[in-house]
Amino acid sequence: MLKYRPTLKQNARTLRTDMTDAEKMLWSRLRRKQLLDVQFYRQKPVGPYILDFYAPSAKLVVEVDGSQHANAGSTTRDERRDAYLASKGLSVLRFDNLQVLREMDAVVGTIYNAIYVHSAGDLRRGEIPPSPPFSKGGMAFASFGNPIKILLSQSEAALAAALDLDQREARLEAQILLCRALDRPRSWLVSHDRDALAQEQAAAFDALLARRLQGEPIAYILGEREFFSLDFKVSPAVLIPRPETELLVELALERIPPGQPCRVLDLGTGSGAVAISLALRRRQADILAVDRSAAALEVARNNAQSLGAHNLRFAQSDWYGTLEGAKFDLIASNPPYIAAADPHLARGDVRFEPISALVAGDDGLDDIRTIVRHAPTYLNPAGWLLFEHGHDQADACRALLMRAGFSQVATGLDLAKIPRVTYGQRPG
């Protein structure tokens, strides 16, 4: 935790007005990150010298040249100062004002590494690592020996900075990753926040955190994602199940009579989240789940087996490609619906997900057009077609269904009140 303790006969206002703009910005950044045991500007005199910033846990001094007391114009004085501090067992990192102002993330990363990763003596003065903390280039941690409370605080700030998460999201992700490394529930962390990690635990946590800081989705790191109150195994071969897709399951369940036979088709099953959720809640339904990807089908089969969905079959098929002559009472699908040029494809989790499960032509509707056009051939009279789509595609999707002769055409809103699932009924 950062500390502010004015030296004798000095108060906070005096100290702040003494600071250069670079020193003020650096102090503000260190406080905001809540990572470093760095004490306040001019806090601790050592012999004849007053220090800029001081990290007592690492015996590290950070100097920002250009302040009125730093004598930045005299290399000899700097060397004499550093030699004196070295004789007291202290290491020095020195940056000039311009370096702090222009390369703030790298400077803070260097300070972090000097305190928590490297021994301070291993760094040359002003050296900046090629992949500093808080940048998207990566982050190195040394979790071994740190209390859980401090470790979570450090990890939360790093995740927030690297992935642009809000504080709540970053805290939750840090806790989830630590719980996986420790094989403990989140409730355990509260009563053991002063415990330190063993070396093996620290190595496991550091590996998980490094992957997340590179942007890898937490669902792929953990290998699982909750959907419809069920735990599904996931891998980079499948799209990560999302909460908004639960609306597709809910609307389908309303149209599958409980306790009665019903033939259901899930097009593009991926992890099997939709098909398995339906199968477990409609045990009398006969459900077929298809996907063009053999790797995705392997994930879905494993999920069906582990979750006990026995009224479910799988087949490899490019949409309706291998289903000639089959008939169903309901067809559900969460198809690709992102436009090829959508800038969101370069952000967040979707960068790691299979592009074939995301993109569908220039307007994102190519696969939906295929599904709607051929659905009447595979639906029994009065059968239903339901599919998920993008937030701005509801009007186009309803138009496609009406042109294909469907009735009862409507769109359902997800929990965020976004048009998410459009559906229609084949005339009886």
Image (cartoon, grey):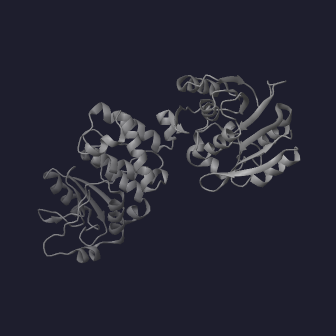
Rendered location of residue 180, percent (x, y): 39, 35
Q: Quadrant of residue 262?
A: top right
- For this rendering, which residue is in front, 381 or 342? 381
Residue furthest out toward the left: 47
Rendered location of residue 241, percent (x, y): 58, 39
**Horizontal relation, residue 227 to residue 49: left or right:** right
- For this rendering, which residue is in front, 165 or 91? 165
Looking at the picture, does residue 76 appear above or below residue 411?
below
At 20% from the left edge and 75% from the top edge, which residue is drawn? 11
At 36% from the left edge and 71% from the top edge, which residue is drawn? 21
- For this rendering, which residue is in front, 165 or 290? 290
**Horizontal relation, residue 308 to residue 119: left or right:** right
Q: Is residue 343 visible?
A: yes
Looking at the picture, does residue 360 appear above or below residue 237?
below
Looking at the picture, does residue 26 appear above or below residue 232?
below
**Horizontal relation, residue 322 to residue 117: left or right:** right
At 81% from the left edge and 25% from the top edge, which residue is drawn? 326
Q: Quadrant of the C terminus?
A: top right
Q: Quadrant of the N terminus?
A: bottom left
- For this rendering, which residue is in front, 425 or 321? 425
Q: How many marks?
A: 0
Rendered location of residue 401, percent (x, y): 83, 46
Q: Is residue 146 visible?
A: no
Residue furthest out toward the front: 259
Rendered location of residue 346, percent (x, y): 61, 48
